[in-house]
Image (cartoon, coloured by chain):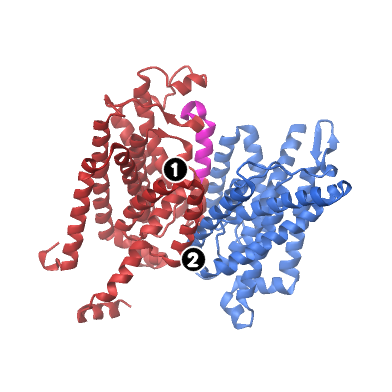
Chain colours: A blue, B red
């Protein structure tokens, strides 16, 4: 019983991290049909932004303030990743619209360069980010079941981000423009929406969310230049499984992969668990080739 | 080809191919053993590139999973070599991981023909299965590409995790002989080089035949308009599956040759980065042209071995930049650049112009 609860909780935790990572992907992929393989590196950038914030606090702030650096590092990593995403869109991505496979290759090249850049600046070994003391320990649910505050905090962070994204996409003018472009780009352009600006904004927001994911990952363990590559393929599987165009598909996909993955790995072992999850995804796609939630369209392709 | 159609251009092309083939076969006389071994490795890579070009350049399906097919071929050959090196005893890594008897699926690999057949069949079969479950449901484009990448990840984790069967992170190495000949001796190496060159030429001819045939035309039709091809009455899924299977089989062949030249196969050879590098070979040489894919593989690997020996860090920057440059500025690769530069010089005849117009 206790073990089941712990495994379910770990699955939830894994799923929420995947969700945070896949959220940005789902937006860029759904809206612009761009496969951003550099997404993992934006996560890495967010993580290093947190690391730098921590170091700045250690160097320039009184020790009593240290515990609060993490609160500041969340918007910092969002902003850093946001700006880099914006530059990436303006400098490269916008030449690749309508060529998803090419965008995949080009952004993969960017990913390689960013990784190597991080290795040059911060060195190849992993660096540790010291989590604030108020996240140490855990909440004791019952005997033998302790839910670490760190993981609870990440789940909370994901929920907050999700609500913010929901409000942005479904309740704001900018979000309405974004959905309009997603549903019918030409029509939206005819109605006076600057699709260029919407694209840039969307890509930058997707990147910013990746930055937040990077910030959250610093709580889970040491970070290194290849941090993003561990998660990127799983995150893409979430997008494939969940379908594009609606947030709910991504949420269900992420939690599904997170929980089944953790359970399979618990029942078998880490390598077999991954195989089983992959087989499940392929089997699922037999039933729903477009993913869980597909945008209804009457066009053929 | 009837002599009538043998325009000077085609003649030059044939001549160039003949010169290239001769140069390939004469290379052992000019190169040192070390360089020859490198070249042999690059020729094996060129075979993968040809297979990848068949599926990507001609059918429009991007597979980031060819490292797996390459690796499976290499492992099949590696298993045979390992068993021969162990000389009837248990391979050393199995001993260390506490196995007491040879697993059943290792046993038949003691036979060379069996290993050879499996090196082609296993990758082809895996490709067929993956293709069956995806193409049939019209899962394609980026969705398929992501699935192939996931295939890479799980295969690598599986091979690392099942250390007692696969040798784990270290992979298979410590080979001594092949069919009784010492694998390290210069004579064997030269022989293996010639075999690789011959296989490369055979694969090239096979691919050229496929591409020029009716089958190849359907593949290109699927690439350019899958639904149109479907409405005309072709079943794209079947063609995609066959093309993917052939492509994977060729990657298996290349993997077998690779392990003979390099003497080691480990999961890192089939990981994500090598798999995607294979795509870059094709992209930089020119997707949709066979010679471009083969030359791209050889030249880029040559550049890599020249660069990365002296500047391993700068190489990754260079590789990344190359991806961006090729995709943004050279979508047709080096061959495309060459053609762009050549075609305006050629005067079109009136007949060709008419044909050109009616095709539009």
Q: Mark 2 = which residue?
A: A99
Q: Position of residue A132 (x, y in %)?
A: 82, 45
Q: Which residues are magenta?
A: B151-167
Magenta segment includes B160: yes
Q: Position of residue A280 (x, y in %)?
A: 56, 44
Give residue B282's quadrant in the image. Answer: bottom left
* Image coords of residue B246 (percent x, y): 34, 48
* Closer to us: A4 or B251: B251
Residue at disc 2, secondary structure? loop
Which residue is rendered at x = 18% and y = 64% of the image? B10
Viewer-side residue, B204 vs A242: B204
User: What residue is pinned by disc 1?
Assistant: B68
Q: Do the dots labelled 1 and 2 sit on one chain?
A: no
Label 1: which secondary element: helix
Quadrant in the picture for residue B262:
top left
Front residue (pair B174, B213): B174
Q: How many marks?
A: 2
Q: Residues within 10 Å of mark 2 (few under 14, many from 20)?
A: few
Q: Residue at x 34, y 37 (%)?
A: B256
Residue lying at the far right in this picture: please name it.
A64
| Residue in view at x 44 percent, y 67 percent | B329
């Amino acid at each position: 019983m206790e073990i089941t609860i712990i495994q379910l909780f770990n699955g939830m935790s894994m799923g929420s991290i995947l969700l945070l990572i896949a959220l940005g992907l789902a937006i860029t992929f759904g809206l612009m049909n761009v496969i951003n393989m550099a997404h993992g590196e934006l996560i890495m950038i967010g993580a290093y932004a947190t690391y730098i914030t921590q170091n700045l606090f250690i160097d320039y702030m009184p020790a009593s303030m240290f515990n609060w650096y993490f609160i500041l590092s969340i918007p910092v990593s969002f902003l850093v990743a946001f700006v880099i995403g914006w530059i990436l869109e303006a400098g490269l991505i916008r030449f690749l619209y309508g060529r998803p496979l090419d965008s995949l290759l080009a952004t993969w090249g960017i990913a390689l360069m960013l990784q190597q850049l991080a290795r040059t600046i911060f060195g190849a070994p992993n660096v540790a980010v010291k989590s604030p003391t108020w996240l140490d320990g855990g909440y004791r649910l019952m005997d033998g079941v302790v839910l670490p505050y760190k993981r609870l905090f990440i789940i909370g962070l994901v929920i907050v981000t999700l609500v913010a994204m929901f409000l942005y996409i479904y309740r704001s003018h900018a979000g309405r423009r974004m959905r309009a472009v997603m549903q019918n780009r030409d029509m939206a352009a005819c109605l006076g929406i600057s699709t260029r600006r919407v694209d840039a904004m969307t890509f930058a927001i997707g990147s910013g969310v990746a930055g937040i994911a990077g910030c959250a990952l610093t709580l889970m363990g040491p970070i290194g230049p290849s941090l993003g590559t561990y998660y990127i393929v799983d995150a893409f599987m979430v997008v494939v499984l969940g379908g594009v165009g609606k947030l709910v598909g991504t949420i269900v996909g992420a939690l599904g992969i997170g929980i089944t993955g953790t359970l399979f790995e618990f029942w078998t072992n880490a390598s077999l668990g991954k195989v089983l999850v992959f087989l499940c995804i392929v089997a699922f796609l037999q039933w729903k080739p477009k993913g869980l939630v597909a945008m209804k369209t009457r066009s053929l392709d | 080809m009837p002599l009538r159609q043998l325009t000077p251009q085609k003649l030059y092309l044939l001549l160039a191919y003949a010169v290239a083939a001769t140069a390939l076969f004469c290379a052992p006389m000019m190169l040192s053993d070390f360089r020859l071994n490198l070249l042999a490795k690059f020729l094996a890579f060129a075979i993968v590139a040809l297979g990848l070009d068949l599926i990507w350049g001609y059918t429009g399906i991007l597979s980031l999973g060819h490292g797996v097919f390459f690796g499976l071929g290499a492992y099949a050959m590696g298993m045979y070599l390992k068993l021969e090196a162990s000389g009837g005893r248990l391979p050393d890594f199995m001993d260390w991981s506490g196995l007491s008897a040879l697993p059943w699926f290792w046993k038949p690999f003691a036979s060379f023909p069996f290993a050879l057949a499996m090196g082609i069949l296993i990758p082809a079969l895996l490709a067929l299965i993956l293709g069956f479950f995806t193409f049939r449901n019209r899962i394609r484009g980026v969705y398929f590409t992501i699935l192939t990448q996931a295939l890479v990840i799980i295969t690598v984790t599986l091979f690392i995790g099942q250390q007692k069967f696969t040798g784990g992170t270290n992979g298979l190495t410590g080979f001594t002989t092949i069919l009784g000949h010492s694998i390290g001796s210069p004579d064997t190496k030269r022989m293996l080089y010639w075999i690789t060159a011959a296989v490369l030429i055979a694969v090239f001819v096979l691919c050229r035949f496929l591409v020029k045939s009716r089958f190849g035309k359907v593949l290109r039709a699927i690439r350019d308009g899958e639904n149109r091809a479907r409405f005309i009455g072709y079943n794209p899924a079947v063609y995609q599956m066959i093309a993917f299977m052939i492509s994977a089989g060729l990657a298996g062949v290349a993997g077998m040759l690779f392990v003979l030249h390099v003497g080691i196969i480990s999961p890192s050879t089939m990981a994500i980065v090598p798999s995607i590098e294979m795509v870059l070979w094709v992209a930089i040489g020119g997707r949709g042209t066979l010679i471009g894919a083969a030359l791209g593989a050889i030249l880029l690997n040559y550049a890599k071995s020249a660069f990365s020996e002296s500047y391993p860090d700068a190489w990754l920057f260079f590789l990344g930049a190359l991806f961006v440059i090729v995709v943004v500025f050279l979508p047709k690769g080096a061959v495309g650049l060459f053609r762009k530069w050549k075609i305006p010089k050629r005067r079109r005849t009136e007949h060709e112009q008419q044909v050109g117009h009616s095709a539009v």
